[in-house]
């Protein structure tokens, strides 16, 4: 029996972190402005934004009369693209900017830093400057991107990615969002995504996402700076080798048994269950056993470790939505109750991970990398990723470094699996003909036993169901980047060729790309068979199209097979290293649920 499901909105670290755009004070409603050819006072702003503390106090005072009167005086454009009056002449009153404007940007704290290095306050301030000059001073945009206009409530209700899709249809890609002191370029084109993620990836880092997650994950793979990430990736990737993944397929099935038992009991009574919650629990149990060799048992009971994980995620969400980082103030960690709770949860998680690392190091088996990858994991007492990493790196492995990596896997490792399983069941119940095909394939290949890797290879349609679910419901629905070095964005399928300024934060909307009719015919339709058909669009010559032959020999479609129009795990250098792990985990669990 297939349980009735209620597909609640799944949370994702990237989506929570991206909510940092909503740093305007409560009550602020309007954002952005249409492209302007004259110095029209910004009457499109609501009164709450006109008096918003997000605007510098003196600037707000200088603009007060203009915003209330609606002055409509023509202004001459500035003589240079840097918006700097090199001659030292005073700005005209019609520019909409106060007399002291240029003096502010001569302060030492406002100076920009070297391209290619980590962005500092002066770089972010420069982005803010260009936005203010564009909106209030009637200067032409330095980035050349249209400025979106709308209401914050359109994207502040937990479904921001849907609001971003509406603006993409109106403005194209990229467009710019401005909220008080923050602004973001939103990319919804695979050619532009390829540019950021692969072709020019050294000119971007994780930006605001790293800032929010650093207190939790330290220098783990997600928040790590480019140099640290390069070192960490080389150390962690070997753990996800073929022999280990083959063994994990069986372990996934083993970890699903408590879930199957609990569903059988529920179906014999009410017949209804919140599947997202169940899938989160089983995904965490799988992470615990496969990565740490630790039994969370969260399907059967609430683990204090799992409770601490979710409390840490809630704190990340809170920080992403808070305008002022009060947690950086002196003594805040001691005086603020929620910060004391947050630090207590982190201490618990760190203590558990430190203990697991200590045990693994004390029982280390000395082998070279070839022997480790050739292990018969069916005969190994501890087949966990932690065991492999400790055995590979040696007894002198840095505990803090390893703990950061493991914390990243613990917190981020279950989100995608829980989401894709929830939405896969949702779509299959909406499309009974596809449900019949999946169940017939499962019955033919595995019956009611735990599948092997060879079984998974044979169940192509089931794998395509997982892939199509990831296309329709990518988790996370957007990626975050920050520009480290100014560069020009390709047009792709857009009319806009934007320039990305150093310090500019960016959203790469996977949801928009995956739902674009330009790159996916009948994009809103649940159609697993679409991955068997090639497709190209002559209207977008820079896009190479989708070619199923390019993922031949692999289990699932890749970003390269669709030339970055399919990015459920990102793409390029910083693509998620656990993509095969997550998709296999989801496929095995789906098979067990439906068998």
Image (spheres, rainbow, N blue to C red):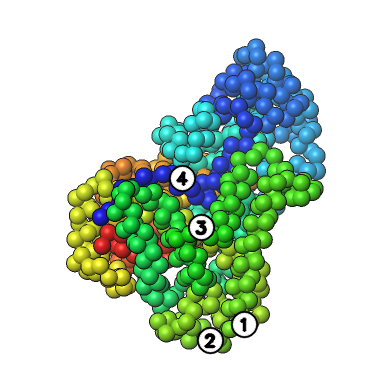
Secondary structure of the residue carrying tag 4 is strand
Q: Nearer the viewer, mark 4 or mark 1?
A: 1
Return the residue at label 2.
368
Return the residue at label 4.
509
The residue carrying pointer 1 sits among few (fewer than 14), some (14 to 19) or many (20 or more) residues within 10 Å by Cα, namely few
Q: Which residue is at the far top?
A: 69
Distance from Cα at disc 2 to Cα at disc 4? 42 Å
Mark closest to the chain's N terminus, 4 or 1 = 1
The percent position of residue 41, horizontal first and vertical second, equals 62, 18
Q: Nearer the viewer, mark 2 or mark 4?
A: 2
The percent position of residue 43, horizontal first and vertical second, equals 59, 18
Front residue of 535 and 525: 525
The residue carrying pointer 2 sits among few (fewer than 14), some (14 to 19) or many (20 or more) residues within 10 Å by Cα, namely few
Q: Is residue 246 above or below residue 349?
A: below
**Which numbered marker is on residue 302?**
3
Query: Are the residues at dot 3 and dot 4 in contact (C-beta closer than 8 Å)?
Result: no
The percent position of residue 419, horizontal first and vertical second, equals 41, 52
Distance from Cα at disc 3 to Cα at disc 4? 34 Å
Return the residue at label 1.
362
In this rendering, does residue 26 appear at all? yes
Residue ID at (51%, 83%): 369
Mark closest to the chain's N terminus, 2 or 4 = 2
């Amino acid at each position: 029996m297939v349980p009735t499901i209620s597909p609640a909105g799944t949370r994702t670290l990237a989506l929570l972190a991206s909510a940092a755009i909503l740093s305007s004070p409560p009550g602020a409603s309007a954002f952005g402005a249409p492209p302007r050819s004259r110095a029209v006072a910004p009457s499109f702003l609501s009164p709450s934004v006109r008096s918003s503390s997000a605007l510098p106090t003196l600037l707000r005072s200088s603009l007060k009369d203009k915003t209330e009167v609606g002055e409509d005086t023509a202004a001459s454009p500035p003589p240079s693209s840097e918006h700097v009056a090199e001659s030292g002449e005073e700005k005209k009153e019609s520019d909409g900017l106060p007399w002291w404007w240029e003096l502010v940007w001569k302060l030492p704290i406002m100076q920009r830093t070297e391209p290619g290095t980590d962005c500092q306050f002066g770089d972010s301030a420069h982005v803010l400057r260009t936005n203010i000059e564009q909106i209030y001073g009637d200067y032409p945009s330095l980035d050349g991107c249209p400025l979106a206009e709308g209401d914050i409530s359109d994207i502040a209700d937990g479904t921001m990615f849907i609001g971003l899709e509406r603006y993409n249809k109106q403005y194209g890609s990229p467009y710019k969002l401005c909220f008080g002191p923050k602004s973001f370029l939103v990319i919804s084109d695979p050619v532009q995504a390829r540019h950021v993620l692969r072709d020019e990836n050294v000119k971007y880092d994780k930006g605001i996402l790293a800032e929010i997650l650093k207190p939790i994950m330290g220098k783990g793979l997600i928040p790590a700076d480019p140099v640290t990430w390069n070192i960490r990736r080389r150390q962690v990737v070997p753990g996800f080798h073929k022999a280990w993944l083959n063994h994990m397929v069986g372990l996934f099935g083993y970890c699903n048994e408590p879930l199957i038992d609990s569903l059988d009991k529920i179906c014999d009574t009410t017949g209804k269950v919140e599947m997202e919650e169940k899938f989160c629990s089983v995904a965490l149990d799988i992470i615990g056993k496969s990565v740490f060799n630790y039994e969370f048992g969260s399907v059967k009971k609430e683990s204090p470790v799992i409770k601490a994980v979710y409390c840490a995620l809630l704190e990340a969400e809170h920080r992403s939505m808070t305008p002022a980082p009060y947690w950086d103030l002196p003594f805040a960690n001691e005086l603020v109750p929620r910060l004391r709770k947050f630090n207590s949860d982190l201490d618990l998680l760190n203590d558990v991970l430190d203990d697991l690392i200590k045990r693994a190091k004390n029982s280390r088996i000395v082998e070279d990398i070839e022997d480790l990858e050739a292990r018969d994991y069916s005969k190994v007492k501890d087949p966990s990723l932690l065991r492999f990493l400790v055995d590979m790196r040696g007894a002198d492995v840095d505990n803090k470094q390893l703990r950061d990596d493991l914390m990243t896997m613990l917190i981020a490792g279950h989100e995608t699996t829980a989401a894709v399983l929830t939405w896969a069941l949702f779509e299959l119940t909406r499309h009974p003909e596809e449900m019949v095909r999946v169940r017939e394939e499962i019955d033919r290949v595995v019956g009611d036993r735990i599948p092997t890797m060879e079984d998974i290879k044979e169940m192509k349609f089931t794998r395509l169901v997982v892939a199509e679910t990831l296309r329709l419901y990518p988790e996370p629905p957007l990626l975050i980047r920050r520009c480290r070095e100014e560069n020009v964005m390709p047009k792709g399928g857009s009319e806009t060729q934007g320039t990305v300024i150093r310090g500019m934060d960016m959203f790469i909307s996977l949801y928009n790309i995956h739902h674009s009719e330009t790159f996916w015919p009948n994009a809103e339709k649940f159609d697993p068979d679409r991955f068997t058909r090639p497709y190209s669009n002559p209207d977008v010559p820079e896009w190479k199209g989708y070619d199923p032959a390019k993922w031949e020999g692999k289990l699932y479609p890749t970003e390269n097979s669709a030339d970055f129009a399919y990015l459920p795990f990102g793409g390029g250098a910083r693509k998620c290293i656990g993509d095969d792990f997550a998709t296999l985990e989801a496929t095995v669990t789906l098979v067990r649920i439906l068998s």
